[in-house]
Amino acid sequence: MTASAATKKISSFASGSFSAIRNAAIPIWKILTFDFSEIVLPRKCLSISIEQSGFSVAYVTKALSRFRVRGIKKYLSDSTYPDPEYFASSVALAITELGGGKSEVTLSIPKSWAIIKAVEFPASVKENLSNVISYEMDRITPFNSEDALYDFKIINEINGHLNVLLAVTKEQLIQSYLDALAGKGIIVSKLTLNISAVESLLGYMDGQTTNLFIEIDESSYEGALFADSLPINSFAAEFKASEERSQLRQILDEISHIIDEYKKDGASLQIYILFKNKGSSFKEMFKAAMTMPFKILNEIDTGISFTGARDIISYPAIGGALETLWQKDRGLNLLSKGQISKDHKPLALTIILLIIIASIGILYAVAPLYVENKRVEELDRQIQARKDEVKKVEVLKKEIELINKDIVTINSFKQDRHMTLNILKEFTSIVPKGTWLTRMRITDKTIEIEGYAGSATELLPKLEASKLLQKVEFASPTFRDARMNMDRFNIKMEIEGLGKEIQVLEKSE
């Protein structure tokens, strides 16, 4: 047997051994890094739900993956929504009465306080989606990222496009409640929506991720279609008439197109109805009018244990606690502003795994070293036999060095001149509102601009004050455009930092 054949045989044996070790280590890694604390360690959550004309506080605990509602408090408000100071004082009192101190705190807000919409992005931005949404916030919503609290979830990825569910609320609207709670020593760790919290409860109850939920109040209704536990189609409205039959017809018209769409696709859709402050006559009419089976939420068991009486139930408050405590939940957290927190693996189990890997490495240390030595000998033999190839490699290295020098020269050239993009940015910052450019010509030394302004003479000192521009003057006389009631101007100037290329940017009128 030749040395080369022996080397290949040893190498093949070592590679197979390490492949077998790697395949065995993968499931071990998953087991040892599994966070058993989610199952074993108890947790508790104080969930606060702001609802119309009041709010609710629920104290929920989890032990051995089982949830228990320890108590619920409901408070009424004179106004549509509670005053922040009264709200914080009542929550502090509820914590004392329920015994929910040192709990994780979740705040759930009405859907009417937020905007929920589906937006589409190219799939190429998936890895940087959080920054893209922050940058595009003022385009896709009435808010900007600095003034908003928001979160998003990816609905699906189809044909190179990401469909994303975005939930946004104005920070100023929520901050007064957060500050009032903080003044009482209550720090909110999660901010969600009532509609999302209810879906968490529905998902826990029946395990389905596609639901249609409708909450019917005395004068209004709201709801959402949930797909993969996300509210992809939400709705809310006031009743247009006081007569119950008209109200029923309005609700059925609202949801009929959703139901029909799912009938076409043949998808399984579970419908839940929550009647609040509605009489039995309306409920009976609704039952008779619905053509699909549905469940009345306040007439079925939630599957969650209660301590004491169950005469007071707040479904958004209970669902908000599940969003915090339930590991399988995909709930929203608007306080995150779209930032995904990475889970930390248990340190003790990781150390055990590393010790096992180190032990295996020691046992197989001799064989790899021997194999590597044989590989080196084989490589030396091949190098001696292929000196010509080595010389060609040396020539290629020299060519690479020359190319790298050219790259450095090009980069230096780019850094020694003002980039056109920087000049455009400068014009954006100094040209006043109400002025626009119809043409811009940038050469290596000069810039010429044409456009309209309320007063063309006011532009000269603004342009002259720029650190990039000098010798600003009119290239031709200005004249007043009677139709537009503005001055038409043609201004030329010089660039303080000179470049070599000529770039022309034109914008048609």
Image (spheres, grey):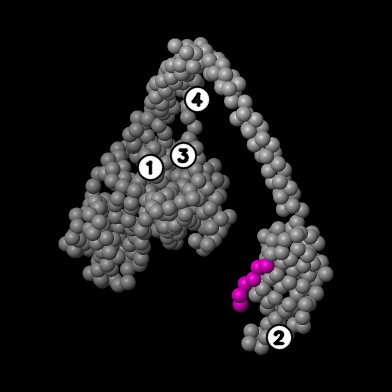
Label whose residue precedes the other's in the sequence (4 or 2): 4
Q: Looking at the picture, which amino acid does disc 3 mark? A: Glu
Q: Secondary structure at mark 2?
A: strand
Label whose residue precedes the other's in the sequence (3 or 1): 3
Label whose residue precedes the other's in the sequence (2 or 1): 1
Q: How many marks?
A: 4
Viewer-proximal residue among 21 and 268: 21
Q: Secondary structure at mark 4?
A: helix
Marks 2, 1: nearer the viewer: 2
Label whose residue precedes the other's in the sequence (3 or 2): 3
Q: Residue at x 73, y 85 (%)?
A: 479
Q: In which quadrant of the rendered image does the C terminus lie?
A: bottom right
Q: Secondary structure at mark 3?
A: strand
Do callouts 3 and 2 mark residues in contact (Cβ within 8 Å)? no
Give percent across and percent down for residue 337. 52, 49
Q: Which residues are magenta?
A: 504-509
- Disc 1 designates what residue? 329
- Disc 3 designates what residue? 104
Give percent across and percent down for residue 115. 45, 59
- Disc 4 designates what residue? 347
Residue 450 makes an appearance in the image: yes
Q: Looking at the picture, which amino acid does disc 2 mark? A: Arg
Is 460 left, or right, of 322 in this rendering? right
